[in-house]
Amino acid sequence: MTVQKETKSKIDYRPLWLGLLFGIIFGFLLQKGGVTKYDVILGQLLLRDFTVLKIMMSAVVVGMPGVFIMRKLGLIEFDIKFGSLGKNVIGGLLFGLGFALLGFCPGTIAGAVGNGYLDATVGGLIGIVIGSGLFAAIFPKVRNGILQWGDYGQLTLPQLLKVNEWVVIVPLSALIIALFVLLEVNGL
Amino acid sequence: MNWLTEVRWSPYVVGAGIGILSWLTMLISKKTLGCSTTFARTAGMLEKLFKGKQVDEKPYYQKVQPKVDWQFMLVIGIIIGSFVSASLSKDFSWEWVPDIWAATFGTNILLRLGAAVLGGILLGFGARWADGCTSGHGISGTMQLSVGSWLSAIFFFVGGIAMAFFLFGGLF
C-alpha cells in the first residue's frame, strides 16, 4: 500500500531562489563547521574528532522542539519518509561504506567543491551520480521485494513507544546534552 | 565582523544554526533539508541527454523526476556558501589528496580519485536505497523523530566506522 503513495510524483517548484538562498546559508555553516573537509569527516569515522556528531546532534536538539511547536501551532506539516528495515538498514550500511571511502556525504561534497577539493569535484560527484543512476536501473527489481522487507511506513518514535511526543523529546534532548558534556569532559 | 573571517566556528554554534535553518525551510518553503535526491535527478537528466524522453518512463524517474527543483538549488547554494565562507577566512585551496588519505595511501592522485569514484558510487546507491542521506535522514528525519531516519543515521555511521577502520586501522 505504501508503494502506491510513494510512486506519486513529488516534483515541486516552490520558489527556487529561496532554495538557493537557504543553500548558501547551509553551505556557509558547513564550511565554518569544518565538515567540508575529508580529514574532519574521517576523523569522526575513526572516532578521533567528534565534530560531525556535535554538529548533527546540536542541529537536532535545536531543530526538534522548534518544529514540534510549529506543528502544534499548525504552521508546518511534517515530512516523514516511508521506511523499512530493508531500506534503512541495508541502504544505510551501503551508504556508510561509501561515506568512509569518499570522505564526504551528498551535502558536504557540495561544500567540498566550493572549498576547492578536487577529489570531491572530479571523482566524488561522478561516482554519486553513477550510483544514483544504477539504483534507478535496479529499482523495479527491488521495490516490491527487499525494500518492503520489515516495512513500518511513516512510524515515529512516539508512535512506536505509544507515548506523547514530549515524553520522547525531553529525555532525548537531555541525553544529547549529556553526550556533549561527556565529549567535552574527555577532551574530544 | 571578525566572526565572518574566522576559519572555524564552534560545532555547537554551527549545529544550532542548521537547526534554526530547518525551522525556516519548513516554515517558509515547506521543505526539509536534504541533498541526495538531487544526484538522482542529475543522473536522470544526464540519461535523458543520451537516451531521450524514454528515460522519463523508468519507474524510478516517475517517482523522482529528472528536473531542477528546490533541493537542486539548495545543493548549488551549498557550493556558493562554502566558497564564500572559505574565501572570507582564506581557507580556500585547490587540493587533490587529503592528509589522512595521503598518510596511509600516499599522494597518488589517480588512486585517490579512483577511491572517490568508487566511494561515490556506493554512497549514491546507498542514499537512494535508504531514501535519504546524512541531512535528509540524519538531521531532518531524526528531528521529526522518524524511526526509519534514526535507523538510517545509525547505520550510516556503523558502515562508515567499519570502512574507516578497515582502510586506516593499520591493515595497509
Image: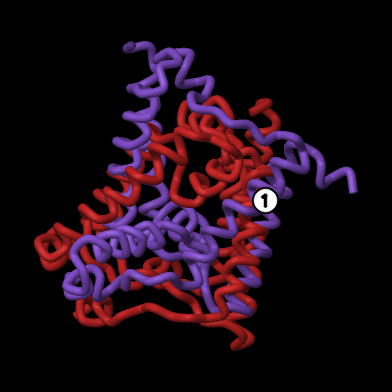
Q: Which chain does tag 1 point to?
A: A
Q: Position of residue A161 (x, y in %)?
A: 40, 66
Q: Would you identify the image quadrant in which residue B171 lies?
A: top left
Residue at 56% in and 46% down: A111
Give left or right: position of B89 versus B164: right
Q: Position of residue B89 (x, y in %)?
A: 77, 38
Q: Would you identify the image quadrant in which residue B47 lies?
A: bottom left
The residue carrying pointer 1 sits among few (fewer than 14), some (14 to 19) or many (20 or more) residues within 10 Å by Cα, namely many
Work out which quarter of the rendered image holds the C terminus of chain A and state it: top right
Chain drawn purple in the picture: B
In the image, farthest residue toward the right: B1
Work out which quarter of the rendered image holds the N terminus of chain A and state it: bottom left
Q: Which residue is mark 1?
A: A29
Which residue occupies the foreground of this view, B95 or B162?
B95
Chain drawn red in the picture: A
Q: Against B139, is A11 above or below?
A: below
Residue at 17% in and 62% down: A139
Residue at 62% in and 85% down: A75
Q: Against B61, is A26 above or below?
A: above
Residue at 40% in and 33% down: A100
Q: Against A148, is A58 above or below?
A: above
Q: Against A65, is A94 above or below?
A: above
Which residue occupies the foreground of this view, A50 or B105?
B105
Q: Would you identify the image quadrant in which residue A70 lies?
A: bottom right
Q: Amino acid at mark 1?
A: Leu
Give left or right: position of A107 versus A28: left
Q: Secondary structure at mark 1?
A: helix
